[in-house]
Image (cartoon, rainbow, N blue to C red):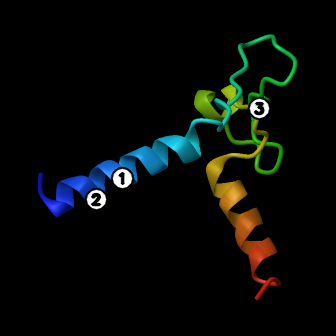
Amino acid sequence: MSAEDQAQQVELREWERNNASRPAPVKYKPGDHGYGPAHCVSCDDDMHPARREHGFDLCVPCKTIAEQAGNQYAR
């Protein structure tokens, strides 16, 4: 076995060990407490169903803007 193959096996085992204890993301079903709103609370656009399943209340563009605004003061 080549050194590259051995390194990949070591990397894979390390990745599996580091990610084994990571909990699965929470998914909600329609009607569950925590299921996201039908519309973004910031811009009132329709929310993507995948974001609603995870309980998010901001659409991707609004979340991006919020993160950028928060990060500009961290520098």
Query: Which comes before the other along the chain, label 1 or label 3?
Result: 1
70 vs 50, left or right, is: right
> Considering the numbered disc 3 on the image, is that residue within a helix, a strand or a loop?
loop
> Considering the numbered disc 1 on the image, is that residue within a helix, a strand or a loop?
helix
Q: How far from the left and from the top, in percent, is residue 52?
A: 70, 29
Nearer to us in this view, 54 or 36: 54
Q: Which residue is mark 3?
A: 55
Q: Residue at the location (61% across, 27% down)? A: 49
Q: Which residue is mark 1?
A: 10
Q: How far from the left and from the top, in percent, is residue 72?
A: 76, 82
Type of amino acid under label 2: Ala
Q: How far from the left and from the top, in percent, is residue 68?
A: 71, 72
Q: Are marks 1 and 3 in contact (CB under 8 Å)?
A: no
Q: How far from the left and from the top, in percent, is residue 66?
A: 77, 64
Q: Give the Cα separation between the discs numbered 1 and 2.
A: 5 Å
Q: Residues within 10 Å of mark 1 (few under 14, many from 20)?
A: few
Q: Give the Cα separation between the discs numbered 2 and 3.
A: 39 Å
Type of amino acid under label 1: Val
Foreground: disc 1 or disc 3:
1
Query: Which comes before the other along the chain, label 2 or label 3?
Result: 2
53 vs 44, left or right, is: left
Nearer to us in this view, 6 or 66: 6
Q: Residues within 10 Å of mark 2 (few under 14, many from 20)?
A: few
Q: Give the Cα separation between the discs numbered 1 and 3.
A: 36 Å
Q: Residue furthest bottom?
A: 75
Nearer to us in this view, 48 or 8: 8
73 vs 62, left or right, is: right
Type of amino acid under label 3: Gly
> Considering the numbered disc 2 on the image, is that residue within a helix, a strand or a loop?
helix
Q: Which residue is mark 2?
A: 7
Q: Is residue 65 above or below residue 25?
A: below
